Image (cartoon, rainbow, N blue to C red):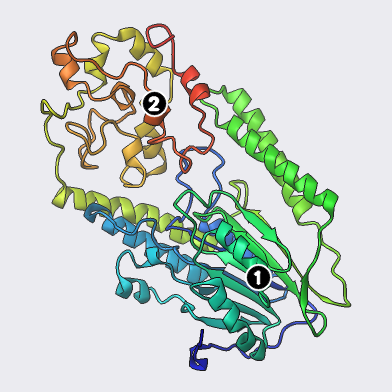
């Protein structure tokens, strides 16, 4: 593959021999400014990432932030009613990246969900596919394939690159196979997973050429430290085996306790105890991960580790301003659209039953209503109001009854009587059943497929159907 020299961008800065070159990578942020907050202790947030980058820059060595694409939007097609929110979110994310000193980013197809002109107008420092840039002795290569990235290595080396990172829009598993036959590239970062949920975990493997997948939706950073001590190649520094095993064990314990904290119907006392344990484990893991690695002076080396952006991590105040402004603005934008262009839900028909509300169900199912009131479902909408997100289209659909369904909620300014996760959210619309209860039924025993519409891996990562179901049954309600 032949590439023109004119496509190359340069940075005429000599690599530091005293301090490491630190690079932070994000990938597939998908427009996430911060976690939704539906579950406790959720990772992520651009202000938490900003704090980590700022701390690295305090050491005095060069530190760069590189976003690997598909960062601005989560879907290729955006409904008209959600355009204002998604564009405002993209602008907020772009402003936050600029404030935290984003060095480079590669664009992905989702970035153009609102068109190329909108994307380019954000003014972000982007690296076009088929080009590279050298940052303090480290080349960041953007290429459509791993083979195309390898073809750029000789040219990058001539421009002063001592270590090469390739950003390639292909799944982690594919790149891991292809990396076995590649020479001259030290690290490959996957910028395009198989689907929206394929990048739920941080992954790093390989030999001379390592391949990384960074947890999507801004929940983790990949931190790479390149120590350029002498001339010649750069080798991966092997970690302490015992330390690595302990880190792995702590990762597993953190996720186990995180799930226990989010168990439904947990007493306040038990929740507090488990949260304290979770915070203790996270602190232990971070202290161990941050333990300085002995870097030899007789050769150039590189190390990498993931930084999960836990809810206990501090936030950068300057970047947090953009998060807060977005939360306020988007609610107002969505409410204005609903009042001007919103369309109410259609009435029920024989073919499509409609939602009637909890009061209609309770007339015959009082025992079930009593059990339902002991759960968190009746307070679903109120939980949004507490954090000011009741007009956020990313959230409201799972906090009301009958979202986008006949006689349900189709406009955020028409939620009265549906401000809860009610009987019909699980058992289906009841208009036909209310009229002829002996002839028409509802779903008596919902299975997991009903629940995961909202309790998905994104919003309810520790959801376990059997454990959750056991908390919402009782006399007159499946018990």
Residue at figure coordinates x 50%, y 22% from the top left: 466
Which residue is disc 1 drawn over?
181
Residue at figure coordinates x 14%, y 44% from the top left: 343
Residue lying furthest bottom: 6
Q: CA distance from mark 2 to mark 1?
A: 53 Å
Q: Position of residue 114 (x, y in %)?
A: 30, 66
Q: Position of residue 301 (x, y in %)?
A: 79, 72
SS assignment at label 1 = helix
- How crowded pointer 2 is (Cα within 10 Å; few <14, some 14-19, many 20+) is rated as many
Which residue is disc 2 drawn over?
377
Q: Nearer the viewer, residue 268 or 209?
A: 209
Q: Quadrant of residue 453?
A: top left
Q: Position of residue 167 (x, y in %)?
A: 55, 70
Residue at figure coordinates x 48%, y 37% from the top left: 460
Q: Nearer the viewer, residue 160 or 144?
A: 144
Locate residue 32 relative to residue 421 in the image: left or right: right
- Residue 141 shows up from this direction: no
Locate residue 127 relative to residue 294 in the image: left or right: left
Locate residue 223 relative to residue 380 in the image: left or right: right
Task: Give the mark nearer the N terminus: 2 vs 1.
Answer: 1
| 150 up-or-down from 13: above or below | above
Residue lying furthest front: 181
| 237 up-or-down from 274: above or below | below
Residue at figure coordinates x 48%, y 41% from the top left: 457
Q: Nearer the viewer, residue 141 or 252?
A: 141
Q: Quadrant of residue 291?
A: bottom right
- Numbered disc in front, either 2 or 1: 1
- How crowded pointer 1 is (Cα within 10 Å; few <14, some 14-19, many 20+) is rated as few
């Amino acid at each position: 593959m032949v590439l023109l020299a004119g496509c190359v961008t340069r940075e005429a800065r000599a690599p530091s021999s005293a301090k490491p070159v630190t690079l932070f990578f994000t990938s597939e942020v998908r427009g996430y400014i911060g976690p939704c907050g539906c579950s406790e202790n959720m990772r992520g947030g651009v202000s938490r990432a900003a704090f980590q980058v700022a701390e690295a820059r305090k050491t005095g060595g060069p530190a760069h932030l590189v976003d690997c694409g598909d960062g601005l939007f989560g879907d290729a097609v955006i409904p008209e009613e959600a355009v204002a929110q998604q564009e405002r979110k993209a602008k907020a994310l772009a402003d936050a990246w600029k404030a935290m000193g984003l060095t480079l980013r590669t664009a992905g197809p989702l970035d153009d969900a609102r068109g190329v002109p909108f994307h380019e107008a954000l003014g972000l420092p982007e690296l076009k596919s088929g080009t590279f840039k050298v940052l303090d002795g480290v080349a960041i290569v953007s290429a459509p394939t791993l083979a195309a990235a390898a073809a750029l290595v000789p040219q990058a080396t001539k421009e002063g690159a001592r270590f090469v990172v390739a950003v390639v829009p292909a799944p982690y598993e594919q790149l891991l196979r292809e990396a076995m036959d590649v020479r001259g590239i030290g690290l490959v970062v996957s910028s395009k997973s198989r689907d929206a949920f394929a990048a739920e975990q941080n992954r790093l493997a390989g030999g001379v050429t390592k391949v990384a997948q960074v947890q999507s939706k801004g929940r983790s950073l990949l931190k790479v430290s390149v120590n350029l001590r002498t001339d010649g190649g750069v080798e991966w520094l092997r970690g302490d085996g015992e330390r690595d095993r302990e880190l792995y064990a702590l990762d597993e314990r953190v996720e186990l306790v995180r799930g226990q904290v989010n168990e439904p119907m947990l007493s306040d006392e038990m929740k507090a105890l488990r949260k304290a344990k979770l915070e203790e484990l996270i602190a232990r893991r971070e202290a161990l991960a941050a333990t300085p690695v002995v870097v030899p002076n007789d050769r150039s080396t590189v190390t990498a580790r993931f930084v999960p952006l836990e809810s206990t991590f501090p936030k950068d105040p300057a970047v947090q301003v953009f998060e807060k402004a977005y939360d306020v603005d988007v609610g107002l934008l969505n409410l204005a659209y609903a009042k001007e262009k919103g369309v109410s839900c259609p009435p029920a028909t024989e073919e499509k039953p409609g939602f009637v509300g909890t009061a209609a169900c309770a007339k015959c199912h009082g025992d079930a209503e009593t059990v339902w009131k002991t759960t968190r479902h009746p307070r679903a909408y109120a939980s949004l109001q507490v954090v000011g997100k009741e007009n956020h289209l990313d959230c409201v659909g799972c906090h009301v009854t009958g979202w986008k369904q006949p006689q349900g909620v189709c406009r955020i300014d028409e939620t009265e009587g549906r401000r809860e996760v009610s009987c019909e959210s699980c058992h289906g619309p009841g208009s036909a059943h209310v009229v002829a209860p002996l002839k028409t039924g509802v779903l008596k025993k919902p299975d997991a497929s009903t629940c995961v519409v909202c309790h998905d891996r994104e919003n309810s990562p520790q959801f376990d159907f059997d454990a959750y179901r056991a908390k919402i049954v009782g006399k007159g309600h499946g018990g």
